[in-house]
Image (spheres, rainbow, N blue to C red):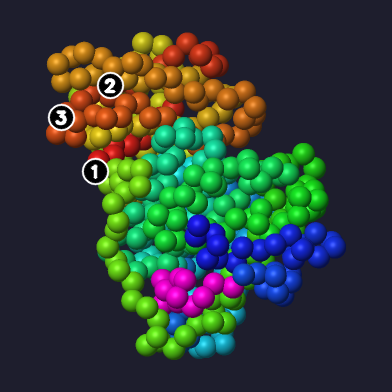
Amino acid sequence: MVRQLCAALIWGSIILTGCATDAALRESARIPAPADNPRLQHAMAKLRRGETVSVAVLGGSITAGHQAKPPASAGWAGLVARWWREKAAETGGKIEYHNAGASGTDSAFGAVRVRDQVLVYEPDVVFVEFAINDQWLNSRVRRRSYEGILRQLLAGSSRSVILLALNEKARPDKSAGADEERIGDHYGLPTLVWADWVKLSAWDLYFTGGETIHPNNEGHAGIAAGITAYLDAVWDSLPPDGAIPSVDPGLPEALVSGEFQNITLIGGNDTEALAVPLESTGWQAQKAILPDEWINSGKGLLTGWTTDKPDADLPIRVRGKSVGVLFTESDQYRNGLAWIEDPDGTEKPKVTINAYVSYRTGYYGYAYAEIADNLDPAKEYILHLAVNTGGRQNAPANVIGVVCTNL
């Protein structure tokens, strides 16, 4: 397992207060051999030479720093950024650091965001964190979408990709980390598993009050301590430039599916995809919520659709192996309905878009629903978006975008 090549940290490395120090973690870590991560070694060698290294983090609300105070500097991503900047100060290099954490997003959303929020910065190193949010994504979808993220990041590149598996309070198995680690192992990528370096008795110190998902400052520091221990291990064993193994930029055959490597996103601005004029559908275009967290393919703020009309039907022309819908969840929404119409006019089963979530009071989350899979990419289908009877009545149904995947 790739985890065995990483700093797989034992329980005794946690000090009595429950907060781990880098030194304590380093002492108990199984240090990877220099050849274990040549991708990361090449990135670190650039920094050692005094060059500029671009680092990006991609994930959900914990990556964004939620519950850390202040989020940008006290979140795990900000603390890891400090490690890189300290090394740059020692070598005369420079770090460009980009945080693409967006609250509530899973790897299906992440696969859509990779190009515009990560690859645009041409990163040398990328940290990927979706294990918690992916546990609520359909397991068949998340295995494909997570692999799609990795293939987008690795295709034609020697960049380093480091996977981070977080979990809920007191439940190290409450995440999709096992699925994600298996996929990462297929690509020879290290997975850093938070539960590997935390005592079970320490979780209470890492969360405040009734919070069970988002760690407090001590929790973020504990996450960062394990990551920086791993980075230190690789940095301290970094061989001379000429001794670092070369990296094959080619991709192996997909473990599950490569379809989420190739994505088409259809939004409210893509009027050419509509089968009929928008004004005749009962739907109208609207800007996505939290636009500062969401950029759509260089086209500006993402625009989707909304309606509160019970008979609304928005037909959209789609092509792909699978078709899914991005949407937001809230106690203020009604549920949607979506289905695929074949070229011969027959309709596939209808799928409920569960936008109404009673416990999301005063805030909302993002979600993804797959509408159909195993389609013929050579054919044009019609995706219908309508409303359902479930959820808050006389409230709007909202769709952020339509995702078509292809091999």
Give the Cα distance between marks 3 and 2.
12 Å
Name the residue at 29% across, 33% down.
322
Residue 130 percent across, percent down from the top left: 52, 48
Q: CA distance from mark 1 to mark 2?
A: 19 Å
Please check the rendered image and state whether residue 37 is part of the magenta-colored stretch, yes or no: yes
Residue most extreme to the right: 16
Whether residues under marks 3 and 2 lie with C-beta atoms below 8 angstroms apart, the answer is no
Relative horizontal placement of residue 244, taking residue 91 as reference (left or right): left
Type of the residue with mark 3: Lys
The secondary structure that most of the magenta stretch takes on is helix
Judge by depth and name the residue closer to the eye, 71 or 248: 248
Q: Give the residue number, with chain letter if any, for mark 3.
A: 379
- Label 1 vs 2, first from the N-terminus: 2
Range drawn in magenta: 31-42
Q: Any mark on residue 101, and which?
A: none
Find disc 2 in the rendering and name its residue.
Answer: 340
Q: Amino acid at mark 2?
A: Ile
Q: Secondary structure at mark 3?
A: loop
Residue under the image location 42 percent in, 41 percent down: 143
Q: Is residue 210 left or right of residue 82?
A: right
